[in-house]
Image (cartoon, helix red, strand yellow):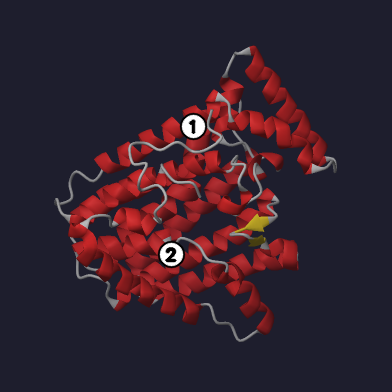
């Protein structure tokens, strides 16, 4: 059963914030202060870059930013920049652009998934409608591109490549696999594109914008992509959590909207009779919701999926991708930065929200 997310060797740290876990231990205190100072600059810069003279655009652009967020991506950029010149103005600018890209993607994702809640508040499209939510996402993407344009061709190429993968990931998730595709492998590629690509870019950006060693770019990109897949796999488990107050989302948001997640895909791959029966209940419920039925009709089937071995298998898969991310760090020098990145990979696969 996985009705509460089990720990993986660090039960005393699971209640800590992601930042506290990444920088745990006395040896990391100096690095923590350095990263916190850099993140304060990013927050100040985000507040500036999100300002729009148009009152409506200003309100919609700031909406999900004001709702909070972990700021995982800029934190990674600031952290990896310590392998170069540190949190320079260029690093802060690059981190800001990547966080705006992430923010813009949330507006689009919620429209496409039909999500009612994001970061504990009503989703933007629930407040302003689909058109305004989509246009707000577009506005944030354009602002991110404007920032990257200040830093030259390599920065623009990083932004363009990342944005392309974000779009392709969303497109492939929307159309789904063909008969020739393995559904699980297809889904893992979707996660690598939709989530992993931006975390990979954020880790790599710390090197690019701080004039760090070029030979660290590829391993950090690989690290970020694998950690991003682990992050999203655990999100699939958290999506089934019964505690909406803790996760900030309605349990089973994705599946209620007909968006397959890894627990469902592993359930569908099982030949067990009870698994087939549960899959049929979920499929029927999704179809009825699409026809206008009350989404709460899936409460019991999704609770059963939460406690099913397919969800436990998803949890183990997240931990494997996390371990692969740690192994990708081998070319980096030993020290607090590498240790912090390794703890980050561990933490993203062992959290409750």
For the residue pair 192 and 16, the one nearer the viewer reads as 16
Residue extending farthest right: 292
Q: Determine the secondary structure under disc 2.
A: helix
Residue at 31% x, 37% y is 324
Residue 154 against residue 290 in the figure, above or below: below
Residue 306 against residue 126 in the figure, above or below: above
Q: Residue 353: where, in percent of width, then height?
A: 51, 50
Residue extending farthest front: 12
Q: Determine the secondary structure under disc 1.
A: helix
Residue 169 against residue 84 in the figure, above or below: above
Could you tell me how far apart the alpha carbons at marks 2 and 1 are, in whole angstroms?
A: 28 Å
Residue at 48% x, 70% y is 144
Q: Residue 193: where, in percent of width, then height?
A: 47, 46
Q: Residue 325: where, in percent of width, then height?
A: 31, 42
N-term-proximal mark, 2 vs 1: 2
Label 2–label 1 contact, CB within 8 A: no
Residue 329 in sight in this render: yes
Residue 155 against residue 178 in the figure, above or below: below
Q: Which residue is mark 2?
A: 98
Counting labels gives: 2
Picture quarter containing residue 177? top right
Near mark 2 (Cα within 10 A), the count class, few <14, some 14-19 or many ≥20, is many
Residue 182 in sight in this render: no
Residue at 57% x, 21% y is 269
Q: Which residue is mark 1?
A: 314
Q: Nearer the viewer, mark 2 or mark 1?
A: 1
């Amino acid at each position: 059963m996985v009705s509460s997310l089990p720990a993986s060797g660090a039960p005393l740290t699971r209640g800590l914030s992601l930042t506290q876990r990444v920088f745990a231990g006395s040896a990391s205190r100096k690095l923590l202060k350095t990263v916190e100072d850099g993140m304060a600059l990013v927050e100040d810069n985000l507040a500036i870059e999100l300002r729009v003279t148009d009152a409506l655009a200003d309100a919609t652009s700031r909406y999900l930013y004001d709702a909070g967020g972990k700021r995982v991506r800029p934190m990674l950029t600031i952290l990896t920049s310590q392998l170069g010149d540190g949190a320079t103005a260029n690093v802060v600018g690059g981190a800001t652009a990547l966080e705006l890209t992430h923010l813009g993607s949330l507006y689009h994702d919620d429209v496409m998934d039909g999500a009612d809640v994001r970061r504990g508040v009503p989703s933007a499209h629930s407040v302003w409608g689909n058109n305004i939510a989509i246009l707000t996402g577009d506005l944030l993407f354009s602002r991110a591109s404007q920032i990257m344009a200040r830093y030259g061709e390599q920065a623009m190429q990083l932004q363009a490549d990342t944005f392309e993968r974000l779009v392709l990931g969303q497109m492939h998730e929307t159309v789904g696999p063909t008969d020739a595709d393995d559904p699980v492998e297809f889904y893992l590629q979707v996660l690598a594109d939709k989530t992993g690509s931006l975390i990979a870019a954020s880790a790599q950006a710390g090197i690019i914008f701080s004039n760090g060693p070029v030979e660290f770019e590829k391993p950090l990109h690989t690290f970020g992509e694998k950690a991003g897949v682990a992050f999203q796999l655990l999100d699939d488990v958290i999506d089934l959590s019964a505690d909406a107050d803790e996760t900030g989302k309605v349990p089973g948001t994705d599946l209620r909207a007909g968006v397959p997640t890894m627990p469902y895909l592993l359930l569908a791959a099982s030949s067990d009779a009870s698994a087939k029966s549960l899959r049929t209940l979920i499929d029927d419920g999704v179809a009825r919701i699409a026809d206008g039925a009350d989404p709460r009709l899936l409460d019991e089937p999704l609770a059963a999926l939460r406690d099913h071995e397919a969800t436990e298998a998803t949890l183990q898969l997240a931990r494997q991708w996390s371990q692969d991310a740690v192994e990708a760090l081998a070319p980096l020098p030993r020290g607090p930065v590498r240790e912090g990145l390794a703890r980050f990979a561990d933490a993203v696969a062992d959290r409750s929200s």
